[in-house]
Image (cartoon, rainbow, N blue to C red):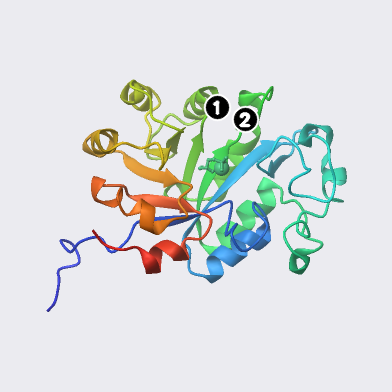
Amino acid sequence: SFEDPVTAPRPHPYTIAHRGLSAHAPENTLAAVRAAQRIGCQWVELDVQLLGDGTPVIWHDNGVRRCSNSRGKLIKLDLAKAKTLDVGSWFSDAFRGERMATLEEMLELIGELGLGLNLELKVNRGRDAQALVDAALPMALKALPAKQLVVSSFNSQALEAARDLQPDVDLLRLGLLYEKPPRQWLTEAERLKAYSLHVDWRRLKEKRAREIKEAGYQLLCYTANDPVAFARLWPWGVDGVISDDPSLFTYHLPMP
Ligand code: G3P
Ligand code: CA
């Protein structure tokens, strides 16, 4: 029988490909974003930070050892040097020669593919939150419509700087990243005029999840790669998951 799509149970959480489709391609690369789009993802999550010369690039770690054929700190590289790194072959030979993406290159691709972007302002140890926001945020706001962008961070200075740069909630959606939302999460969310909370699904409790939803915020869980374990959280009102492989959730989530 026909079910009204408005009142029908939600079939699955909406999904965001974590660092691109990082289960199947080298994380935070153009290739990982193309791969996400190919399997039907509508949103990707990516990390942004600055090179030593101030160029915003898509990168997660403080150093380059784990995800390239080189070693050393990201801050020691300028763009010319960063572009000599192979950031694909550590993952598999099929991605040999993949280059580190600048934020600018990545925004262009995301615009072309029509994807949504959850851009995480990644303030690694000792790095300047304000400088990152000043370099990355205007570029992202210019490249994508406001509804296609959620800017998140664990770093409250970065979130404050972002909100100062664009005070209008309709023009900048901010996501508060927490391993575990603290008791004062609502004060933080109100102060920063947040759009969403992004929490580690293993640390989320039902009471907190329901509070967040009752207060009207989007609730996303990271990094969810186990749909069977995640199913316990689904009835609490979680909206979406940030996953290394979103296809796990669109096809295999057992319903409560
Ligand atoms: O944005 C969610 C998740 O990416 C945060 O943790 O370490 O993967 O950047 P991490
Ligand atoms: Ca991230």
State which tag comes first along the sequence, 1 or 2. Answer: 2
Q: Please indicate whether residue 248 sits to the left or right of residue 7 in the image.
A: right
Q: For the point 29% across and 51% down, which residue is it?
A: 234
Q: Is residue 217 left or right of residue 101?
A: left
> Quadrant location of ligand 1?
top right
User: Which residue is label 1 attached to?
Assistant: 158
Whether the residue carrying mark 1 lies under 8 Å from ligand 2 is answered with: no
Q: Secondary structure at mark 1?
A: helix
Specify whether tag 2 is near ligand 1 (CB below 8 Å): no
Is 9 on the left or on the right of 239, as rendered?
A: left
Does 96 sit above or below residue 136?
below
* Residue 26, image x, y percentages: 68, 57
In the picture, the disc for residue 133 is none
- Is residue 74 shown left or right of residue 149? right
Rendered image quadrant of residue 253: bottom left
Tell me the element at label 2: loop
Residue 155 rendering spot, x and y as whole percentages:
53, 27
- Residue at the spot 69% in from the left edge and 53% down from the top edge: 105
Toward the front, the furthest residue is 229
Amino acid, disc 2:
Val
Residue 140, percent across and down? 57, 44
Q: Decide: few, some or many residues near mark 2? Use Cα within 10 Å; few <14, some 14-19, many ≥20.
A: many
Question: Which residue lies at the image location 67% right of the left edge and 25% below the top edge?
Answer: 125
Residue 123's tag is: 2
The quarter of the picture where the C terminus appears is bottom left
Q: Nearer the viewer, residue 199 or 158?
A: 199
Badge 1 amino acid? Ala
